[in-house]
Amino acid sequence: MPLAKSDDLQIAQHTLRISDPESSLSFYEAKLGMTLLTQRTNNTATHFYLGFREPDSATAGEEPNLADWQQHSFLELVYDPEQSPPDIRRQPDSSEGYWKIAISVADVDIAHSLLVSNGVEVDTPRQVPDIAYLCHCNDPDNYCVELIQHDFLQNHTPQTASSVYPLGTRPTFSLITYRVKNVEKSLNFYSDVLGLRLLSRQVVESRGFTLYFLACTDEDPPHPDIENIDNREWLWQRPYTMIELQHIWGTESDDDFAYRVGPETGFAGVSFATRKLNNLLETAGQKGFTIDADNVDPILQVRTATVRDPDGYSLRLIDKG
């Protein structure tokens, strides 16, 4: 049975391989306003755990308490000098499986102006019809970062920039986005096996794709129709991280097509924390999904398992119990 309650399952970590820790940490901390919560070393690899934290919630020099972040998602950056640097292709690249992360803010124009003043190259903010008001930049390794506004441009009330936040208003780690070939198989995996809830389906006919937004939540969107446009601003205001799956029409019919999803892309996968690891693994096995490993993580010192979704993305399950 899928996990029904958000307390049983959460998006815990989003993991990217990096080539230069100093440049990456400077970007995510100084430019975007994340906090380096802690770092750990395992063999030759160093793991950096970052997240958005209220500026007055930590004492200088105090080791962050990861238990405080049980309802939040981390960005995990992994540096291993013994591995070849990741080959990250600039987005949009429709052959690339991994796409971006998105950070939601109350005012994209303010965030855009502050990033430009800090030397970050950012494209011009624009209203994507019936989707969102947004813009994009790239981190030092070329990973795409999207800034997405809480409300559409036509509904927006300009905000006052706060010096507390490098992006001008309070940020949320909103989306982890990647592409899937057969969306029915993917929704079966993420909804029926893992237990994420489908909150919104957004058809972008002019571009030939559909977006699916899933989360570990018990919340109901304002409108029961998941394609209703009125749900979309609500979506960008959620205080938690969601999975966004992009399905480009026709890929499911091409037997020779497959997204590039291996470790060379730099996207090392998403981790989910669960209180029902055994049940989830049993369900995944019964439905024919590959379980790569089931062991004790040397950094977290808890039991973890790694499974593959229908496109071959690596997903780690962490024993939250």
Image (tube, grey):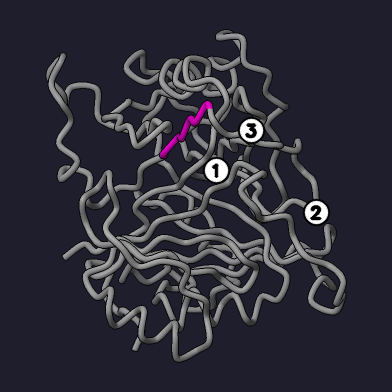
Magenta stretch secondary structure, dominant: strand
Instruction: Return the mark for residue 84.
Output: 3
The residue at which mark 2 appears reads as 95
Does 80 lie within the magenta span?
yes
Along the horizontal axis of the image, is 93 left or right of 72? Answer: right
Q: Real-space Cα distance between discs 1 and 2? A: 17 Å
Query: Mark 1 belongs to which amino acid?
Result: Ile
Instruction: Return the mark for residue 180.
Output: none
- Which percent across, then down, holds residue 93? 80, 46
Q: Residues within 10 Å of mark 2 (few under 14, many from 20)?
A: some
Query: Mark 2 belongs to which amino acid?
Result: Ser
Vertical relation: 38 (above or below) 229: above
Instruction: Return the mark for residue 101.
Output: 1
What quarter of the picture does the C terminus occupy? bottom left
Q: Which residues are magenta?
A: 76-81
Q: Real-space Cα distance between discs 3 and 2? A: 21 Å
Along the horizontal axis of the image, is 247 left or right of 110? Answer: right
- Which percent across, then down, holds residue 64? 18, 30
User: In what element is the residue under mark 1?
Assistant: strand
